[in-house]
Image: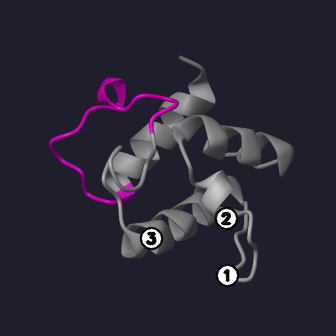
Amino acid sequence: MSSLKQQVKELIISALELEDIKPENIDDAAPLFGEGLGLDSIDSLELGIALKKKFGVKFSAENADNKKHFASVDALVEYIEAAGGTS
C-alpha cells in the first residue's frame, strides 16, 4: 500500500471516528458511500475538512466532480496527487 493511501485511510478513520475499522479493512477501490464503507453526506463534509487540513486540497460545493473524487480511496489519492496536496 502506498504511503499516501495509508495516510488517507488513517485520516478517514480518525476524522470520522470509525473505531471498529482498520486501514487494511478499507478496500482501495470500494465505494466510500452507500454500500461500501457506508459514509453519508455529513461524513463527506467532515472528511473534506480533514483532507484540506492535512493535504491542503480544497473541495467546492459547486464542483460536480466531488462525487467522483470521493468515490473511493483510490479516487481521493488520485485527486490529492493531481491537486499537488502534501502532508
- The image position of residue 27, as x and y in percent, is 41, 28
| Front in this rendered view, residue 27 or 7 | 27
Query: CB of mark 1 within 8 Å of CB of mark 2?
Result: yes
For the point 43% across and 49% down, the residue is 32
User: CA separation, marks 1 and 3?
Assistant: 13 Å
Query: CB of mark 1 within 8 Å of CB of mark 3?
Result: no
Task: Return the mark for residue 46.
Answer: 3
Three-letter amino acid code of the residue under disc 3: Glu
For the point 41% across and 50% down, the residue is 12
User: CA separation, marks 3 and 2?
Assistant: 14 Å
Q: Reading the chain from its start, which is encountered first: label 1 or label 2?
A: 1
Image-based side of 83 in relation to 87, left or right: right
Q: Residue furthest left?
A: 20
Task: Return the mark for residue 61.
Answer: 1
Q: Reading the chain from its start, which is encountered first: label 1 or label 3?
A: 3
Task: Return the mark for residue 66.
Answer: 2
For the point 72% across and 68% down, the residue is 58
Three-letter amino acid code of the residue under disc 1: Ala
Q: Quadrant of residue 65?
A: bottom right
For the point 84% across and 44% down, the residue is 82
User: CA separation, marks 1 and 2?
Assistant: 8 Å
Image-based side of 4 in relation to 63, left or right: left
